[in-house]
Image (cartoon, coloured by chain):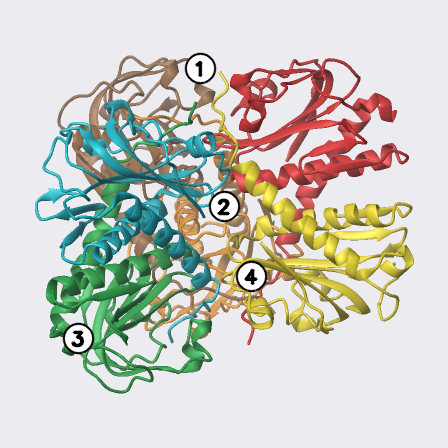
Chain colours: A green, B cyan, C yellow, D red, E orange, F brown
C-alpha cells in the first residue's frame, strides 16, 4: 500500500471520499493511504454515516486528515475492521508521542477525557472501499467539545508520518502473516 | 457473537484450534468467543504458524486463553484483522486495569518492556475461521522471557471478562456501523 | 434477524425498496424483515423487475407487504433463493391457516386456481440485498385476476405474524445447521 | 444444471457425498443433480451433520436418493438455502402426486403426521458444495418411525423425475430472474 | 454463455456498455457475448477508463464490436482477466486468418507494427461485469494511427464468428477444467 | 508479485504443487511465481487433474517449470483464467524468441504441429491457488509425442526469464487497469 503526505492545504468537505479522488489528486492508481492538513466542513449530502444526518454537524478549523482507498479489498465489513484498527493505531502512536496523555478509543473515535479528538467513517463505492479518519490539530470550529494535537503537544506532521508508516507496516505484516498460516481440520 | 468463560482448567495444546471444538466443548453452534485458564504446550503438528516451526516452542505454565470461531466470516484476511483488533483491545483493557504499565502492541503480540505477554494465531478450517490469543497469567514454563498478568497485578478472570465484553461489543458496533453507511460515488 | 409488524397503513409504491428505508422508518440498523398493510401502486421508475416494465402494472387496493433488508448477505443470488424460500414458506403458512385451499407456488408467485395471490421481487443496493413480497388481502385495484386472503378466510395480521415467525425461525435454523456441518473430501 | 436418473441400485453409505463422485459415477464434469434408488446406511465417519453423531443412526432399506454437486456455487450458506428449497419443492411435488396427504416441511425434513419421510444434509468440499436428500420409498430398516412413498401411493421413479425437473427448472428461473433485476439506490 | 451476431449496424457510443443493454437489444437474460459492426464515437461521459479522459478520444468509422455481459461473475478482477484473454484469443484468431501478419498483444490492446488494431475496456455495474472489445474493420475516423482488418485481408464477419466461437469454447473448457480438479494440501 | 529463477535442478513430481512449498523452498511469504529446470514425473497421487488419472502419465526428462502460488486470490475460477493467460503469454514469448515457429494454444496446452510443448494444471489449497506450467526443454522421457524448446532453438533460461517478466508485468497492468475504471449504470 502506497502512503503519501500532501503538502498542500485541502478543505475536507466530504466530496474527497469518492472513488478515484486519490487518482485524480495524486495520480495513484491502486490502494493508497494519504494524509493532509486542512479544515473540515462536511455537507449533509456528503455525509456517509446516516447517524450524522441529524447530528450537530461535522466541522473543525484545523485537522490532520487521512483518506484510504482500497480497490483490492472493496468489502465494507473488512473496511470497518481496518478503520477500527487505524483508530487503534492512532491511539498507539499518540501514546508514544505524548506518553502522559490518556487517549481512549471508543469504536472509531478517540477521546481525551470528554474532548473528542477524532472523526471517522468507512464506506464503499462500486469499485473500492474508502476510509476517512481525521484528528483535530488546533482548536476552533467544532460543534462539540474537542481535544487537539496542540493540547497534547504533538506536532501534526510527525503524527501523520508515524501513523502512515504504522498503518502501512501493519498491512504488510498482515499479508505476511496470512501467507505463513497452515489451515486446521475438524475436531474429533 | 456469544461469549463464555469456561471454569474448568484446560491444557491448550493446539488441538483445540479446530473446527467445531467449541460445539463439542460448550455446545455452541455458531460464532463464539470463549476464554479459559490453563497451561500451554503446542505440539509441532498443531502449530498453525509456519514461522513457529523452527522457533523455541510455544509453551507456558499458566495462561488465559481465548478461542474464537466464526462460521459467518470464514475469510482468513478478515480473521487476521480481527486478531490484530483483539490484540489492540487486550492492550486497551490492560491500560484500564493496570494504568501504570506500558503495554506495547507489535502486530498480534503484546509486550511489556522486553517481556512477551501474549501469543496468537489466526487460521482457517474448511468451514470457519479461528483465532487463538493467550496472555501469560503467572510466570513459568516459557522458552522466552515473558511478562505476566501477575506482574501487572491484573486478576486473570477480570481481564478475561473485560476482553470478552469488549470484543463482543466491538463486533456489535461494527455490525451497527456498517448498516448505517451510505455508499459513495465517483469523483468528477 | 429482527422482525416487526408496522401498525400504520403504508402505501407501497416501490420507493420503500431502497437501502436504509427500514432504518429510516423503524430505526433498525441491521438485517430485518418487516410487514405492514396498505395499497400497492408501483411506478415504472421504481420497478426493479425489468420484465414488469411492459406489463399490466403492479397495483392492488389492499395487500400485506413484507420488506426484507440484509446487510450481512448482500448477494443477489442468495437473495433470490431467500425470496423463493419466503414464497414457499408463505404457501406453507396458508396451508395451515386455510387447509382447504390449494395454493400453488410458481417461482416467487403464489396462485389459487387462476387467481394470482402475490407479487415479489429481490434486488440489491450498493450496501444490501432487498426483498419485497406482498399478498392480496381484500379484492380490488389489480390489473390482473387475483385471489385474496379474504377469499381464503385468512386474517391478514395472523398471516403476517405467522410468516414473520417462520421466516425468522428458518434463518436461525439455517445458521445453526451450517455451524454443525463437517466438510467432506475427495472421492477416490 | 444437468439432471440424471441412475437406473442401477446404489447403497448410499455417505461416501457418495464427496467431491467428484458424480464425475466418477456418471462422467459429469460440472454442476449436476442425480437421483437413484437403494438402501441407506451411513457410517459415523461419513456423517456430515455433527448432530447425527449421537443420534439413532441414519438407515433405511429403500429410499429415493438425490445427490447434488455444485462447483459454480461452492458456498455453504447458499447450499443450505438450496437444500431447504429442494425440500420445499419435494413437498410441493408430493402435494401434486398425493393430494390427500398432508406433508409438512420442518427445515430440511418432511413429515407426514409423526412419520419422518426424508433425510438431508448440505456440506462443502474444498472445490464444491454437496447436498444429499432422500425420501423413504418402502418401509423397513429405519431406526425411527417413518412414512414412505408407498404409503402415500406415490411411485418412486415418478417422484424422482418430477423433483429433478422442478429443481432444475427453478434454478433456471432463478438465473433468469437475477439477470432481469435493476438495482436500487438509497432512501432519502 | 450465449453468443450472437447482430446484423444491424450500431453506432457504439459507450452507452451500450450498461447493465441489461443486451437484454434490451437482444432479449437475452443471462451471460452473453454479442458482436456487431458499426462506427465508434465514445462521449467523455461514457468513457469507463479514466485514463482515456484526457486522451485523443475514442473513435473510428468502422469497427467490429464485441459486448460481453456476465451476471454470473460480476467481479472486476475476473472481468479484466477475461478481457485480457479475449484480446489474446483475438490475436490467435488473426494468426489463423492472416498468418503473414505479426499481431502483437500489449495488455488489452492489439497492434500491427505501430498501428493500433483494437480498443477495449472492462468495467462493472451493480449487477454485472461488462467488457467492450472492438477491432478496426476499415480505415478512417481514428484520432491515432490504426491498422484494420481490411489491411490484414481479414473479413470482419468471419473474424467475429471465429472469436465468438473461440471465446465461448474457452469459457466452456474453463468450466470443465475446474470441475475436474482435485485440491492440494500442505507442504511438509 | 515476486518472480524468481531457482538455479538448482529440481525433479518435479507434483508434490511441489502444495501450499507453502515456495515459502519452504525460497522463503517467500506471499504471492510468487518461480521457475526452474528439471525432469518431470508426476505420481498418480499427486495428479490434480482427474482427467490425467487414466492417461498415459505425466513425464519428461527435461522441462522448464513454473510454479505460481497466490494467497491474495485463492479462487479456482480466477486461477484457471490466470493459467490460460499464462499459457497465452508463453505462446507470445515464443513467437518473439522463435518467430518462424507456429505455436498453437489449445486451452492450457501449447502445441507445435502434432508435438505437445507444455503441460499445466491449476488447483487450490485451503489457503491459496496454485498453477503449474511447464515446457519441454530437450527431448526424451515423455509418454506422448512432444516438441521442445531445443527444436525451436529457444534457450530455456531466456524463455523462463521472459515469461516471468511478462506474467508479472501483466499482473501489474491488470491491477493498474482495474484501479482506473469507472463503473457503469443501467440501460434505459
> Disc 1 and disc 2: Cα gap in Å?
31 Å
Q: Is residue B15 left or right of residue E96?
A: left
| Mark 3 and mark 2: Cα distance apart in space | 61 Å
Nearer the observer, disc 1 or disc 2? 1
Image height of A182 relative to D36, above or below? below
Q: Residues within 10 Å of mark 3 (few under 14, many from 20)?
A: many
Residue E93 falls in which quadrant of the image?
A: top left
Element at label 2: helix
Q: What's the CA distance linking mark 1 and mark 4?
A: 44 Å
Cβ–Cβ below 8 Å for labels 1 and 3?
no
Q: Residues within 10 Å of mark 2 (few under 14, many from 20)?
A: many
Q: Which numbered disc, 3 or 2, marks the residue closer to the eye?
A: 3
Dot 1: element: loop
Q: Earlier in the sequence, mark 4 or mark 2?
A: 4
Q: Are marks 3 and 2 in contact (CB under 8 Å)?
A: no
Dot label at residue F55: 1
Question: What is the number of the mark on residue E163?
Answer: 2
Task: For marks 4 and 2, give the CA distance.
Answer: 23 Å
**Is D154 positioned to the left or the right of A115 in the image?**
right
Q: Chain of mark 2?
A: E
Q: Which residue is mark 4?
A: E19
Q: Which residue is mark 3?
A: A149
Amino acid at each position: 500500500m502506497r502512503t503519501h503526505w500532501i503538502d498542500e492545504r485541502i478543505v475536507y468537505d466530504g466530496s474527497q471520499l469518492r472513488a478515484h479522488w486519490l487518482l485524480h489528486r495524486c495520480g495513484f492508481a491502486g490502494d493508497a493511504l494519504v494524509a493532509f492538513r486542512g479544515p473540515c466542513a462536511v455537507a449533509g449530502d456528503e455525509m456517509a454515516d446516516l447517524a450524522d444526518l441529524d447530528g450537530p454537524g461535522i466541522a473543525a478549523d484545523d485537522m490532520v486528515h487521512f483518506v484510504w482507498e482500497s480497490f483490492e479489498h472493496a468489502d465494507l465489513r473488512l473496511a470497518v475492521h481496518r478503520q477500527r484498527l487505524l483508530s487503534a493505531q492512532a491511539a498507539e502512536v499518540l501514546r508514544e508521542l505524548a506518553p502522559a496523555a490518556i487517549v481512549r478509543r471508543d469504536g472509531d473515535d478517540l477521546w481525551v477525557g470528554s474532548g473528542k479528538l477524532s472523526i471517522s467513517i468507512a464506506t464503499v463505492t462500486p469499485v473500492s472501499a474508502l476510509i476517512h479518519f481525521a484528528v483535530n490539530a488546533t482548536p476552533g470550529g467544532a460543534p462539540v467539545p474537542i481535544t487537539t494535537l496542540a493540547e497534547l503537544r504533538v506536532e501534526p506532521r510527525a503524527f501523520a508520518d508515524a501513523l502512515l508508516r504504522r498503518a502501512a507496516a501493519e498491512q504488510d505484516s498482515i499479508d505476511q502473516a496470512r501467507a505463513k498460516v497452515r489451515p486446521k481440520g475438524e475436531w474429533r
